[in-house]
Amino acid sequence: MPYLFCSHVRRFYMKKVLAALAIGLCVVAASTAQVKNGAIADKVIYTVSMDQSLAMKDVVEGKADVFFQAVPPNILRTLSEADKAKLDIYAVPSGSWSLLLNPIPNKAPYTWTKTDGVTEFNPLAIREVRFALNWLINRKKLVDEILLGDGDPMFTAMTPGQPGTYRYNLVASKLGMTATGNERKAIGDIETAMTAASMLPENKGKLVKVGKFWQYNGKDIAIKFMIRVDDPNGRLPAGRYIADQIEKAGIKVERLEWDRSKCSKLAYYGNPADYEWHMYTEGWGAGATRAWWDITVSQMYSPYYGYMPGGADPANWNYTNDRLDEIGQKGMNGQFLTPDDYWASNLEGVELGLKDAVRIQLATQLDKYVANKARFNGRMAYGMGDGLNGWSIRTADVKPETSGAAKGQKILRVIQFSARGSLFMSSWDPIGVDGFSDVYAGAIIDPICDASTFESPNNASDTPLRTKYDVKKAKIQPKLQADGSMGGTVPVPATAVLYDSATKTWKTVGAGKTAAVEATGSYIGGKWHNGQAITMDDVRHAMAFQVEWATKDGEGDKYFDDAYSAQYVPALAPNQGFVFNKDGSMTSYVNYFFAPELNRTVATVAAVAIKAGNPGRPQVTVPWEVSEALGLLVAEGSKSGTVYSFTNSDAVTEVDVVAAKCVADIKAKLEDMVAKNHVPASLKGLVTSAQAVQRYKATIAFIDKYGHAFVSNGPYMIANLDTNTNSVTLDAVRDYPYKSDYWPKYFRQQITTIDNVKAPTTPSKKADAVFEISASSFVYPETASTPLTSKAKVELKLQLDDGTEKVYAAKYTKPGMFTGTIPAKDLAALKSGKAYTVVVMSYFGAEAPAVVPTSLVLF
């Protein structure tokens, strides 16, 4: 299952500052001097199980501390009450299912000639056929019968019930989509579309319906449907049901029940023109707890991002939609002047994505993760929108070992499920866009690497981790330019610089430039896992590396990657210049403005980062010498003769900092850099050859000691990695800026829950509509709840036909009970018989609100 990445190239590590964070640095933690630096556990051991039932049994019996994937509901229900009592369950709506469709050629006459000369008709090339699948599939049936009620029907890629999603999910309602669908309508719509296609001159006499099924050139048309066999309790039965539904519409289905490796290779890295598949049952992990969802518009609907058919690889046939690309890039790169513009454009993007129906969302899962209750001193932090994650590992407080060589140490034992028995499904590539693209890698690397900022697991707020800045000192003067792109009136100093890939130098921008925002930030240093200090040289090299590999300087440019460029070029374009200050800080001038939230605007511009690539994983960072060596491997070649790339392809090998062959080549390249006294072009005049060689030798020594080249900056490091036994051991890094108890204390927060909403049974325009709301609260990350008090706010938000909403404050009546009223005078303006959405929301303050949508039909 891939993650639903939160991957704005700058936003990943450039977020809003929270003044309270400064107290978390170890330099002001004298009162907790006895507490270790770094994470709580001394060691983390990851193992793999090929059986979910056995994995859960290991947790119940205390052989493992936590199962890091969600347990399917039908397995969890087999437990006895005694065994359930031994578990701490983390229930989070974090997983989802969708269908990815191959629409080649996506235009009339809907045929494609394969390399063998055979021409095929693709019914999924017809937009109306794709769109009709939304009615052909009964999403409620999937939730009730396969997920056993642990989930919700899903229409957009925005998780229902999460902050900021209800506006997006109203788009599906506007288009008439329902949880149960409408099989008769869908079959009729598909029949109409296929009949219209059969009347096209190119298809007359070739595309005909014979008996129950459609044929082309005398052969049954068949959709090649890749169904994940390694998800036997979820997507396998879901795929079989959907295949049966499609055949009801007169189109045969070839059921390709394959595992993740085979399916994902074709769906995400193959060429749709090879015509090897038509449909795939995708599974997603949320990847983050988020408040803003513009990233999701890009990832799930916009072709430029690389997650649609063809993968934005110019060597492939690619699904295209210029308007979706424009909307996605504008949202990701802060190109809206007002919140209204932001929302209008992003909502348009979702509507276009739903109508084009190249990706169709099916259901969200109420994922349930389990931990052995007796092994923990308290609950771990977890993502309110994505479940167990890197913060769970960082905050896991297990009881110390009572015997053996590790007596007194806290050792966290994590088990993961993999049908193939492997934790290494994707390349561990810290540069390319496809690196670390599986859930197994994500679980391991999250506590190893520190992003500059992160989205807080408890409330989705943008929180600085390895950077600091002052929001109040920023200058913000946005102004749209003549072409509609973001600009501004803040003067950019003539001495500010940008890296120039053609000349391999930092060039001054000259006089006359302006920007939307000026903001200054600095990096909170520390050391890399190889013992070397993290410096502004890492910052400069990362910035230059992005420009170098995203920019094509002529046809023969070896320092260029198409897929990398597709994501980085739009994000780099707003940069107007940078000033590296004498005090180690950096002032940035950027045409970026996040209209809905001012603090995010400043953070995106001000935060300082050391990330050279891998935009899909915000936390993945390596020192400049590793990035440089990887770049030289790809551009110059390797000692072994292996042809490396930053892009996954059959013709080349993607770089991998833990694969033995690639690690040997990385080491050889570093040794060559030592011999040549190599200094990267972007650091010339800043780093001496002696200083560079010191870095190379430190990483060579690291490789010799640990057998891999994944040097990073987080509170854990990989001490042992065994691809034969599929186990990974992490050791705590104690030379780290934060104390181990800081983040558990920081995340504790009171959060509300809406337990029930009783809407009026027979609402009328002549009387007030009264909603009775029961609500409670709990202190994150604990589970014990209490009735909600009058200190909380509860609101009704009536969604109107023009896209606006009216907000009504609910009244507190007694502990845990509130009454919300929509007055008759407002109801009088509404249409009779029409279903109106009413969103019920509760919150105390800045935390993520609880959100429950309900409906109101006036009679």
Image: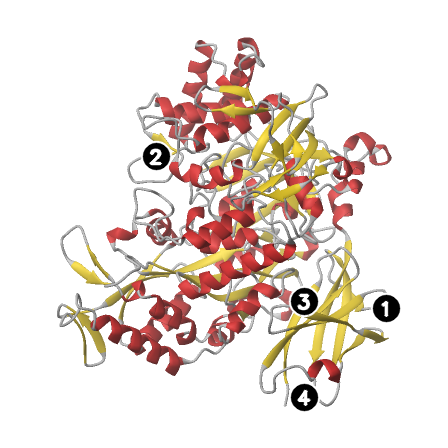
Q: Nearer the viewer, mark 2 or mark 1?
A: 1
Q: Position of residue 54 (x, y in %)?
A: 50, 58
* Residue depicted at 45% across the width and 47% down the height: 305
- Which residue is more in the foreground, 259 or 101? 101
Is residue 549 rendered to the left or right of residue 219?
right
Residue placed under numbered mark 3 in the picture: 851
Q: CA distance from mark 3 to mark 4?
A: 21 Å
Q: Quadrant of residue 168?
A: bottom right
Would you say the residues marked 3 and 4 are in contact, meaning their CB atoms lie under 8 Å apart?
A: no
User: Residue at label 2?
Assistant: 653
Residue type, numbered disc 4: Thr
Task: Identify residue for label 4.
Answer: 761
Q: Does residue 785 appear to the left or right of 334 in the view shown? A: right
Q: Amino acid at mark 2?
A: Thr
Residue that mark 1 sits on: 790
Q: Amino acid at mark 3?
A: Val
Observer-side mark, 4 or 2, equals: 4
- Crowding near pointer 4: few (<14 within 10 Å), some, many (20+)? few
Q: x%, y% of residue 34?
A: 81, 34
